[in-house]
Amino acid sequence: MADLIVALDLASADEALAMVDQLPDLEWAKIGPVLFVREGPAVVRGLKQRGIKVFLDLKWYDIPSTVAGAVAAAADQGIDLATVHSLGGQQMLEAAVKACGTTKLVAVTVLTSYSSERYWNTVGRESVTDLGPEVSRLARMAVGAGVHGVVTSVLEVAGVRSALGPEPWIVTPGIRPAGADSGDQQRTADPGAAVRAGATHLVVGRPITRAESPDEVYKSIKQEMRQAR
Ligand code: C5P
């Protein structure tokens, strides 16, 4: 059964914890850079005290010793899952894995905000329309370096799953239940499609946190995930 991770992209720790308290069955929460830079480890402690698993999504990309230090600090705080960036390279990923203790690591592949043209311009190669093979290449490199899985756009999950085989975690954002507002997400799929494509962890933010009844939406997404098996 895939897990549902709620992205707490809210303005303060108070708001984030008030949201969590409306979700009695919540198992996983994601903290991103905005909330973490504002509130720091206090918000992590608030979640851990409530028995919620914490996904710290700061997408580390730096020299290996600095990333290893950040990962070790996350492990010390009991963070359950954190992101590193695959473009930091094999050496950086291996250093992160060495430092992670019981914290699991997933590697970001190609940011979904990239068009293929902008991506190839950035890495200095001729433009290729399809980014799928590049996403799979980075995913294989990252998993080869020892991370537990990757983060990828929901439209690339099936290709990455076939490149990686059954074991590695695949975490995917851009999930929208049928009829939900896609907001600023361009490439979306519904929860059932993401699970069937091979995702192990679905990240959903605003469709839950901006709902009139967050708990009802949370439960209906979980139900759809169960039925998609
Ligand atoms: O509100 P929504 O469901 O769009 O939230 C998706 C979450 O996943 C946000 O926290 C966003 O930062 C994150 N994310 C994303 N696309 C990526 C990487 C992370 O939407 N490529």
Image (spheres, rainbow, N blue to C red):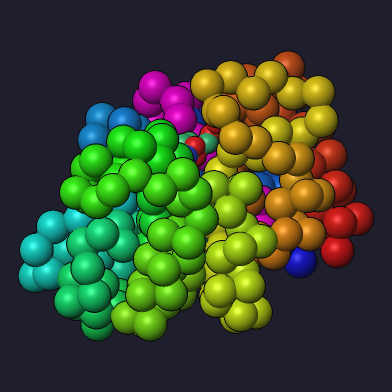
Q: Is 92 situated left or right of 109 in this image?
A: left
Task: Confirm whether residue 27 shows in the render.
Answer: no
Vertical arrangement, residue 161 with respect to residue 121, above or below: below
Displayed quadrant of residue 140: bottom left
Look at the image and say whether residue 83 sits in the magenta stretch: no
Displayed quadrant of residue 107: bottom left
Residue 156's spot in the image, x, y percent? Answer: 58, 54
Q: Is 98 situated left or right of 211 in this image?
A: left
Vertical arrangement, residue 117 with respect to residue 91, above or below: above
Residue 204's spot in the image, x, y percent? Answer: 61, 39
| Region of the chain picked out in magenta, as a range | 3-15
User: How many numbered discs, if any?
Assistant: 0
Vertical arrangement, residue 146 with respect to residue 87, above or below: below
Look at the image and say whether residue 8 sits in the magenta stretch: yes
> Considering the image in quadrants, where does the N terminus appear?
bottom right
Which residue: 55% across, 28% down? 185
Residue 12's spot in the image, x, y percent? Answer: 38, 25
Asked whether 36 or 144 is in front, the reply is: 144
Vertical arrangement, residue 103 with respect to residue 117, above or below: below
Asked whether 6 or 19 is in front, the reply is: 6
Asked whether 94 or 42 is in front, the reply is: 94
Which residue: 56% across, 28% down? 186
Which residue: 19% across, 49% down? 124
> Considering the image in quadrants, where does the C terminus appear?
bottom right
Asked whether 16 or 166 is in front, the reply is: 166
Displayed quadrant of residue 141: bottom left
Which residue: 26% across, 59% down? 87
Residue 184's spot in the image, x, y percent? Answer: 52, 21
Q: Is 162 situated left or right of 229 in this image?
A: left
Residue located farthest toward the front when viewing the structure as drawn: 126
Task: Confirm whether residue 120 shows in the render.
Answer: yes
